């Protein structure tokens, strides 16, 4: 997992902000992130503006799971792939 995620213990969660050049790139990220979330059956909280999205991946009572960290990795990979397009 990249270093840009902030990990919190109470409640257990990962948080990250992604920035984009404009709304079209942001929209593409949101659409693809939705596909990843549905495939993994994990649904992070997303809040966004015109050129950014804040992502919060909530853990469970036992803490953050491998699936939570895998989702974070997949979102990072998605962001990197969009930056190269």
Image (tube, rainbow, N blue to C red):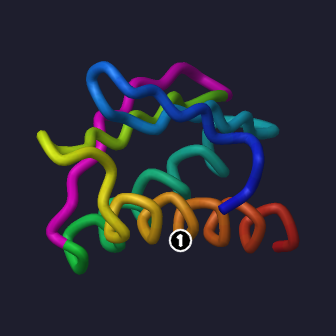
Q: Is residue 76 left or right of residue 70?
A: right
- Residue, far right: 84
The residue that appears at 62% across and 31% down in the rendered structure is 17
Q: Depth check: 18 or 25 in front?
A: 18
- Residue, far front: 62
Residue where numbered disc 1 is placed: 74
Q: Is residue 11 above or below residue 31?
A: above
The residue that appears at 53% across and 71% down in the rendered structure is 74
Residue 48 lies within the magenta run: yes
Read off the magenta span. Answer: 41-51
Q: Is residue 56 above or below residue 44?
A: above
Number of marks: 1
Neighbourhood count class around disc 1 (C-alpha, 10 Å): few under 14, some 14–19, many 20 upward:
some
Q: Depth check: 25 or 55 in front?
A: 55
Res 85 quadrant in image: bottom right
The residue that appears at 53% across and 34% down in the rendered structure is 7
User: Picture coordinates of residue 77 (x, y %)?
Assistant: 66, 71
Q: Quadrant of the N terminus?
A: bottom right
* Mark 1 secondary-structure assignment: helix
Which SS does the magenta portion mostly show? loop
User: Picture coordinates of residue 48 (x, y %)?
Assistant: 47, 25
Q: Is residue 14 left or right of residue 43?
A: right
Residue 74 lies within the magenta run: no
User: Picture coordinates of residue 52 (x, y %)?
Assistant: 63, 28
């Amino acid at each position: 997992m990249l270093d840009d995620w902030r990990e919190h213990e109470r409640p257990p969660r990962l948080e990250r902000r992604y920035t984009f050049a404009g709304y079209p790139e942001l929209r593409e990220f949101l659409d693809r992130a939705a596909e990843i979330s549905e495939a993994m059956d994990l649904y992070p909280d997303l809040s966004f503006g015109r050129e950014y999205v804040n992502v919060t991946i909530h853990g469970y009572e036992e803490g953050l799971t491998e699936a939570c960290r895998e989702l974070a990795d997949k979102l990072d990979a998605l962001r990197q792939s969009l930056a190269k397009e």
